[in-house]
Image (spheres, grey):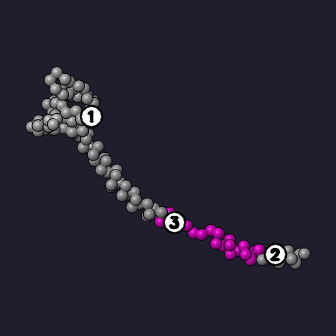
């Protein structure tokens, strides 16, 4: 019985050593993973994040440059002439005796005084 046990132990040890040597395969290093994700991060930055920041900066400059007499277009589609400018609000004349208050951030376009307002056809 002990001979059989020793033979079985030797056989299992002989089979287990090569399996143990193969059990821990070497994975990719951290530098390989960084080099893989770096181009993806750069693509996201230049195609998504940077253009959005530039648009936000242009919009902020445009909104801060609004003055009395400018013709504006709001995000709701209203077109009117600025009557009064406050810190966060504008008083806009839409028609004769029609004046509304608009939050500055809702302005999407500022038109020149010389540019005519298109008619509703």
Q: Is residue 62 above or below residue 91?
A: below
Q: Disc 2 to disc 1, how far (Cα)?
A: 83 Å
**What residue appears at the point 31 percent right and 47 percent down from the top-left corner?**
52
Viewport quadrant of the C terminus: top left
Cβ atoms at labels 1 and 3 below 8 Å apart: no
The numbered disc on residue 7 is none
**What residue appears at the point 27 percent right and 34 percent down from the top-left corner?**
76
Say whether residue 76 is left or right of residue 71: right
Q: Which residue is mark 3?
A: 29
Say whether residue 114 is left or right of residue 110: left
Q: Is residue 29 magenta?
A: yes
Q: Nearer the viewer, residue 90 or 115?
A: 115
Residue 96: give x, y in percent of width and height: 14, 23
Q: Look at the image and give the residue range highlighted in magenta.
A: 12-32
Q: Which residue is mark 1?
A: 76
Where is residue 92, by image quadrant?
Answer: top left
């Amino acid at each position: 019985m002990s001979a059989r046990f020793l033979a079985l132990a030797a056989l299992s040890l002989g089979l287990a050593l090569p399996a143990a040597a193969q059990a821990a395969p070497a994975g990719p290093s951290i530098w390989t993973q960084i080099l893989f994700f770096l181009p993806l991060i750069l693509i996201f930055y230049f195609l998504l994040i940077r253009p959005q920041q530039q648009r936000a900066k242009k919009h902020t400059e445009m909104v801060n440059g609004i003055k009395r007499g400018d013709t504006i277009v709001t995000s709701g589609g209203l077109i009117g002439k600025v009557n009064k400018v406050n810190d966060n609000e504008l008083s806009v004349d839409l028609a004769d005796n029609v004046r509304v208050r608009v939050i500055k951030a809702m302005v999407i376009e500022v038109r020149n005084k010389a540019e005519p307002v298109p008619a509703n056809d």
